[in-house]
Amino acid sequence: MSGFNLSAVAVRERSVTLFLLVAISIAGVVAFLTLGRAEDPAFTIKQMTVVTAWPGATAKEMEELVAEKLEKRMQELRWYDRTETFARPGLAFTTVVLRDSTPPAEVPEQFYQARKKLGDEAPNLPRGVIGPMVNDEYSDVTFALYALKAKGEPHRNLVRDAEVLRQRLLHVAGVKKVNIIGEQAERIFVEFSYDRLATLGVSPGDIFAALNSRNVMTPGGSIEAKGPQIFLRLEGAFDDLDGIRTTPIAAQGRTLKLSDIAEVKRGYEDPATFLIRNNGEPTLLLGVVMREGWNGLHLGKALGVEAAAINAEMPLGMSLSKVTDQSVNIRGAVDEFMVKFFVALGVVMLVSFLSMGWRVGIVVAAAVPLTLAAVFIVMAATGKNFDRITLGSLILALGLLVDDAIIAIETMVVKMEEGASMRRPMHGVIPPHPCSPVPW
């Protein structure tokens, strides 16, 4: 037979073949141990959201004066597909959709270009428009959630503690970001009675004007010396509640302090955007996002060690407890694959040994791990991870792999029994010479 024949070369060069088999086996084991583990495969979201606010505007004004201008700029994107806008009084929600054929590597660049174009268009929007505010990372999947609880501690102090823990968790290998969920925005409330203001001859507008005129950042200029430049700062901005309470209110030729006509107190936004409870207790959640291509089993173990260290240093009454952890699901999927793999390998070896003999059984049994080792090498080279999709595909492929190995080895045995040579491929069946031994 003319032409290159890989099987003939493998039989003829036994030492090279043995070396390659050992190398593939070792490389496959290394690739299996270094491949990333995740619950679901990475999926590129080719959409981004843009939110704009204009207090007091109607839905039609939001559409015509704000959303349409932004949509026209988005049409300049290379992979632009469409925009979907939902407008209501004072708000506009725009979703920018890229074409399905957009290469995943081009998506971050398109989002960057979209941000630039939105930033260029922002000065052309009507005065008073807030935004546009862009979100192109809403597809991040939370790997683990931790609940931070402290009975009796004010919410603002709990938020500060959560910020400290956030910085510690960010130093754990494999953590991409840590989000604090459930934080309530602080507010300062000025409560007054309209009846009392009417009695004193003070209008609410006088109070608003006094607060706005004092709490303003005004440049004070600078002094040019021989060498350095000294900047002047004007004080007066509010930095505590007492400063707000002592704000002078001028009305009808009299000057009053704000504390004389209103009550100033600190609190939180009311009503709250959302509240989080864990086991019936108010709590803050720390959401950990894993880096792309990282081993989820290693990250889950590292987070457990760090959480235990944090709990050991916390004061009495404060705790950091795990709510959800994807590493549990990842470990279950990987363990299921390993069980199915060893069961399939054991069944193949048993059937092969009983029906074909130990030598043929070893060849069939070796085909399964060697093929999987080559698959692991290709997965590591192409940046694939172990997840529910890849593991499910490998489990399905085990059946086909076992069947093909048995058919191939059975065909080889039959041909050799018919007189075919291991070293020289033959087109037809040629009976062996009576005086020559039958090759194995």
Image (cartoon, rainbow, N blue to C red):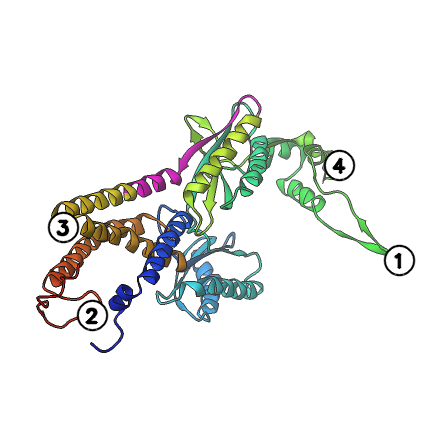
Residue 317 within the magenta-colored segment of the rendering? yes
Callout 2, which amino acid? Answer: Arg
Q: Nearer the viewer, mark 1 or mark 3?
A: 3
The picture places residue 12, in percent across and down from the top left corner, at: 28, 66
Mark before the other along the chain sequence, 4 or 1? 1
Q: What is the spatial separation of the Cα atoms under label 4 and label 1, in whole angstroms?
A: 47 Å
Task: Choose between 125 and 102: the one closer to the eye.
Answer: 102
Which secondary structure lies at badge 2?
A: loop
Q: Nearer the viewer, mark 3 or mark 4?
A: 3
Which residue in the structure is indicated by mark 2? Answer: 424
Which residue in the structure is indicated by mark 4? Answer: 254
Which secondary structure lies at badge 1?
A: loop
Callout 3, which amino acid? Answer: Met
Q: Nearer the viewer, mark 3 or mark 2?
A: 2
Classify 147 as above or below 14.
above
Residue positioned 44% across, 65% down in the render: 106
Residue positioned 55% across, 21% down in the render: 316
Callout 1, which amino acid? Answer: Gly
Q: Could you tell me if the residues under marks 3 and 4 are in contact, i.e. CB atoms within 8 Å?
A: no
Q: What is the spatial separation of the Cα atoms under label 3 and label 4, in whole angstroms?
A: 109 Å
Give the residues drawn in magenta, as a range: 315-336
Circle on res. 356: 3
Which residue in the structure is indicated by mark 1? Answer: 227
Mark before the other along the chain sequence, 1 or 3? 1
